Image (cartoon, helix red, strand yellow):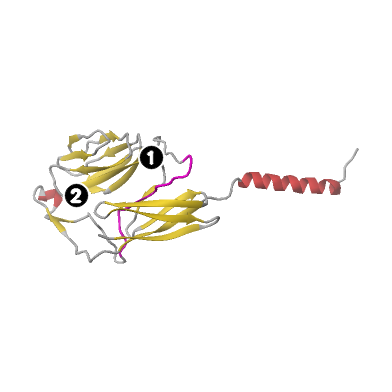
Amino acid sequence: MVTSLAALRPFVLGLAALVSLTAAGPASAGSIKGAVLYNGPAVASKTVPVTIDQYVCGNQKPSEELVLSPKRGIRNAVVSLQTPPPGAKWEATQKPVQLDQVGCVYAPRVVVVPVGGTVDFLNSDRLLHNLHSVSKDNAPFNRTQPRGRAVSMTFTKPEIVRIDCDLHSWMRAWVVVAEHRFYTVTGPDGEFALDGLAPGRYTLQIWQETLGTTTREVVVPESGAASVTIEMGK
């Protein structure tokens, strides 16, 4: 029996629609975008005196404890989901995170690594540095580090770990050991984004080394991004 093309047309159109829906998959995920701003008393810019190795480190360094943009944006705040969606666990299979020492300053000051992940501490300065961790749940370490030698450390427990240099007292960095992938560090203007979220209600947690921790409820809509401005102050 020969079937006419006209008779097959509804079947073909239906099949095409089914293929299109299958290819499209689930609805595109939403996101949370926003900024963390400072709302406390005026902060005077501070410098830290350099007392050793001035030939590499210079004579003073700007304080990085609280870095603000002209519009009060807070740099290096950590924004994360306190209520992550199911299946958000972050497997420690990615490449190690790199944290360098350049001009006697840790760069970047704040890094995020998954539980079980590794940080490669680098030393681009032409002098000896020292890596001294301060932690409660992760094993502490205190390692000297000559120029050009990488020191790799693995972090096994969720925690915010402080890193100091005993040789250069102004040097400080933070390693944020995260249980899931919904963590980010704010940029120069305090901006941040968390992508790949299903619609729903979430609790954001924001941490900054001198301002402490605050939380904020956010609802991600069915389509588009949730926009939020979070203020922190002393």
In the rendered structure, which disc, 2 or 1, sits on the residue that comes first in sequence?
2
Picture coordinates of residue 164 (x, y %)?
19, 43
Is residue 59 toward the left or the right of residue 199 in the image?
Answer: left
Is residue 206 toward the left or the right of residue 147 in the image?
Answer: right
Residue for badge 1: 179
Q: On the rendered image, what quadrant is the C terminus found in?
A: bottom left
Amino acid type of the residue tagged 1 in the rendering: Glu
Picture coordinates of residue 187 (x, y %)?
34, 56
Extreme-right residue of the structure: 1
Residue at 43% x, 39% y is: 89
Picture coordinates of residue 216 (x, y %)?
39, 55
Q: Is residue 119 above or below residue 28?
A: above
Amino acid type of the residue tagged 2 in the rendering: Gly
State yes or no: residue 214 in magenta.
no
Q: Is there any visible trace of residue 147 in the rendered image?
A: no
Q: Secondary structure at mark 1?
A: loop
Q: How many marks?
A: 2
Residue at 23% x, 65% y is: 41
Extreme-left residue of the structure: 51
Write down the region rendered in magenta. Answer: 72-87
State yes or no: residue 73 in magenta.
yes
Q: On the rendered image, what quadrant is the N terminus found in?
A: top right
Residue for badge 2: 103
